[in-house]
Amino acid sequence: MNKPRVLFVDDEPRILDGLRRSLRGRRQDWDMSFAAGGAEALDELAESTFDVIVSDMRMPGMDGAELLTLVSERHPEVARVVLSGHTEREAAIKVAVAGHRFLTKPSEPDAVIAIIEQLMVLTSQTHPVAVRRIAGAVRSLPSLPAHIDQLSAAFRGPDIELRTAVDAASHDVGLTAKLLQLSNSAFFGARTRIASVDSVVNALGVPTIQALVGLGQVLSSSLAWDAPAERHLSIAWRHAAACASIVGSMASPGNRPYAQAASLLQDIGRFVCVTGSKSCDGTVPEPVDAGCAGIPCRDVGVELLHLWGLPAPIISAVAARDTPQQASPSGLGVSGAVRAAHLLLQQTSSRDPSAGTHEDELEALLTHPQLASGSVDWHAAAAAASERAMQRAPE
Amino acid sequence: MFIGAPITDHAGEPLGVLWAADGQPGLLPPANAGELLTAMANQVALCGEVEQARLQYDRALSLVGEAAFRCDGNGVIAWVSPSWATLTGHTVDTTVRQPLSHFLDSDLGNLISDPLGDTDDAPMRRVECSLLTASGDGIPVELAVTRFPSPDTGACGLLGVVTDLRARRQRALEDRHDQKLESLGRLSAGIAHEINTPIQFVGDNTRFLAEAYQEMLALLLVYRGCMDASSGGLSWEERRERATAGEQKADIDYLTTEVPVAVAQSLEGIERVASLVRAMKSFSYKDSSDRSYADLNEALTTTLTVARNEVKYVADVVLDLGDLPEVLCHVGDLNQVFLNLLVNAADALEDKEERGQIRITTRAEDSMAVISIVDNGCGMPPELQRVIFEPFFTTKEVGKGTGQGLPLVRAVVIDKHGGTIEVNSEVGLGTEFVLRLPVDGRRSNGA
C-alpha cells in the first residue's frame, strides 16, 4: 500500500525546513513534499495525488485562502489544514471557509502530526474515496430559504441581541456545523472543546460570527435549489430541529450539548448531497436516502463532520442514527439519546419519511432509567417539538 | 515778554495754554512766533489725544490672548498688559524697558527684533517660541506680532499678542497618541506573525536537535561497546560491522549535514526575534520634549523592521541610504512619520497585479537631510493630492485608516521640524514623498 502523502506549503523556507526536520520521525509512515508557494503547490497536486495539504495563510502572490479554495475545487479529496501565524480575525475568517482544520504558529509537531493522522482516516467503509471527494469539496452549507431572513435579521443589524443570535445560529444546520468546526480550533481562541452553539457564540464573539455570516459564503443563498430539493431539505430540517429541542432533556447533562448538535446535524449529509457538491447533479436523490450515485448521504455527512473536526461523540451519534440502540444500563450515551429522540419524532408530523418507526426499540429505550425516572411524557414533548419546528419551517 | 497759544482737543474744548517767554531780553521774537506757538500747541494736544488713544488701545490689547506687549524700534519692551504678570510671573516693572529677547528663547528673539520682512504682504507674523517665566521655565507660546509704526523715530516698534500653547499642545499630543495607537494596533498583528514564524521553526529545529542528540548518543554507546576492553574477544571485522550498523541506524550522514544547518537556522530565527524586539523598543522610544541628534538612516531601518509584515507581501523594499549627518530632531515622531508613509506605500500597492517596489532614498543636500519614499503603486490624481493632508480624510476602508496619518506627517515634518514635504504622484505610476529636514533643526529663512 502506498504511504499517505502530505504537502506542506509556506513562503518561508525556514518553516518548511523546520517541519521537514521535526516530522522526520514520520518518514517511514508518510511521504512528505514541500512547496514554497501556492502556484508550486498546485503544480505538485496536479502531478500526483496527496491526502493532506498543510498551508500557510498569508503568502505573496496566491494566499492560503485562495490556494485552499482552488484545492477544494480541483482536488476535493485532499484534506486542507491551515497552519498560520496570523492572528487577525478578518484574515482568519476568510480562511475559515476554505480550510478543514486550523493550526496556529507556533504549533508543536505532535499537534501537527495528530491532525494529519486524523485526516488520513477515511470514515466510509464502503466508498472511502468517493465520499471524501464529495465531503471534501464542501466549504460551507447553504441555509434553508426560510432561515436566511431570520439569520440576516439576527446577525446583520447594528445592535445584535445575543439571545436572538444564538437562537438563529443554533437552528441552522450549516452555520452550526461551521461554528463548531471553527470553535474547536485554537486558531479561533478555543481552549477547550466546545459542543454547544451557545458557547461557540460566546467563545468566538458576535463580531466574528457576524463577519462569517456577512462573508456570504456561509449564508449562501439557496436560490439555485429547485422546489423538490427545498421541500426535501425542509422536511429533514424540521425533523432535526425537533429532535434537537427534546434531546437536551433526554441526554445526561454532560452529553447534552453533543446530543443537541448531533440531532441538528443528523442529516447534514443530505444538505451536502442535495446542494453542496459538484459530484452530484443537485436533484433530490431517489430514493431520498440513496445519496449521490449510490453513495449514502449519511456517509457523506459523517465524513464532512470528521473533516471539519467536530467532537467525536457528535460524529458517532450522527453515524449511528439509523443503528438500533439498546438501553445500556451504564447510560444512554449521546448516540442512544439521539436515536431515542429520532424515534420519538418518527411518530409525529416531523418524521423523517426515509426512516422507519421501530416502535419496539423506542419502547425499550424509553424504559431506560435516564428517561423513565422523571414524569415526562416524551410522546407529548415530541409532538410539541414537532409543532414548533413546523411553525419555523412551514410546509 | 510772553506769548501764548490755547491748547484745545479736537472738539475745541480748552485743555490749557502753551506759554513762551523770551529768555534773552531785548531779542525780538520772530515774526511768525505766534504761528509757531499755535502749531506747537496743536502738536501738544495731538500728543495728548494720541496718548489717550494709546491707553485705550493698550487696554483693548489686554483683552486679547493670554498677554500682550508693545516694543519700541529697538526691541525694548515699552508696555505689557497686566495679564503678562499672571502668565509669566514677571512684574510689569521688571519687564518694561527690558529687551523682548530676554524673555524668549534666543534665536526666536532675534527673529522678532529683525524687521518683519515685507510687511505689506505679511502685516502679521505668527511665531511659536518659548516664553521664559520668572521661575526660569519656558512656556510654549505663539506670538502674533505686527509692525507698530513709530513715526517719531522712523524705526518700527512691535505689537504682539501672546497665546499660551500648553493646552493646544496637550491636545495635539493626545491626537498624536491616538494616531500612534491606531498604527500600533495595525502593527501588532504583523509583529505577532513576525515572531510566531521564527518561534515555529526554532521550536521544530530544537526538537529535531533533541532527537538528533539521542541518535548520536545511541551511536556513541555503540562505539563505546566496540571499544570496551571486556569485549576483547570481538574481531576487528565484527566491531566495524557493529559500528557501521549503528551509523546507518542513526543516519549519521544526514545528521552530519543537517544538524549544523538546523543550529544555524535556529540562531538566525532567534536573531530575527531579537532584532524585532530591539527595533520595537527603539521605534516606540518615548521622545522627551527636547530634540536630540539622531541617525535617520537607522530610524528608517528600525521602522522598516517593525513594519516588515505590512510590506513584505506586496513589495520589495530597496534601501538606498546615503551619508547623512545626524539630524537634530524628535526621532520618535519621525519614526511615526516614516511608518505612516511606508504603510501608505504598501497600501497603494495592495491591488497591484505583480509585486511592487518601495524605494527609500536618503541624501544630504546643503543643510538638509532629504528622505524620499517612492512606490510604484496606484498613484493619486491631483484633486486627491490636494486633500491628503486634511485631517480625517481617507480613501481607505473603515477600520483600516482614520485619515490621521498624513496630517501627522505634516504636523511633525513642517510644524515641528521646520521641514518641507513634496508630493509627486501620477495615477498608475506611483507616488513619491520627499521630506526635507533641516539638519540643525532650524527652519531655513523663507521656508
Image: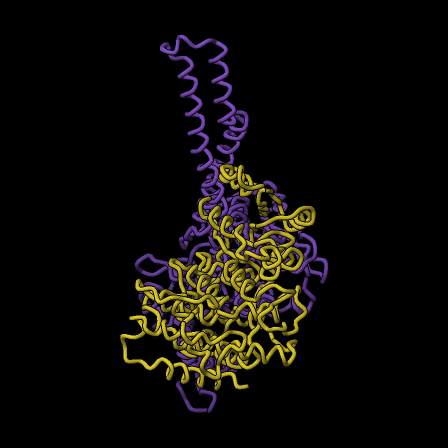
Chain colours: A yellow, B purple
Picture quadrant where residue B56 is located:
bottom left
Residue A236 pos. (x, y %):
53, 76
Residue B69 pos. (x, y %):
42, 69
The N terminus of chain A - image quarter = top right
- Between B117 and B391, the one lying in front of the other is B391
Residue A215 visible in the displayed image: no
- Between A182 and A25, the one lying in front of the other is A25
Q: Is residue A104 above or below residue B151?
A: above
Residue B321 pos. (x, y %):
60, 43
In the drawing, does residue A77 fall left or right of residue A114? Answer: right
Residue A357 pos. (x, y %):
46, 76
Q: Is residue A247 above or below residue A45?
A: below
Residue B185 visible in the displayed image: yes
Q: Is residue A351 above or below residue B249?
A: below
* Residue that protrudes farthest toward the bottom in the picture: B12
In the drawing, does residue B335 fall left or right of residue A75? Answer: left
- Between B47 and A180, the one lying in front of the other is A180
The C terminus of chain A - image quarter = bottom right
Picture quadrant where residue A369 is located:
bottom left
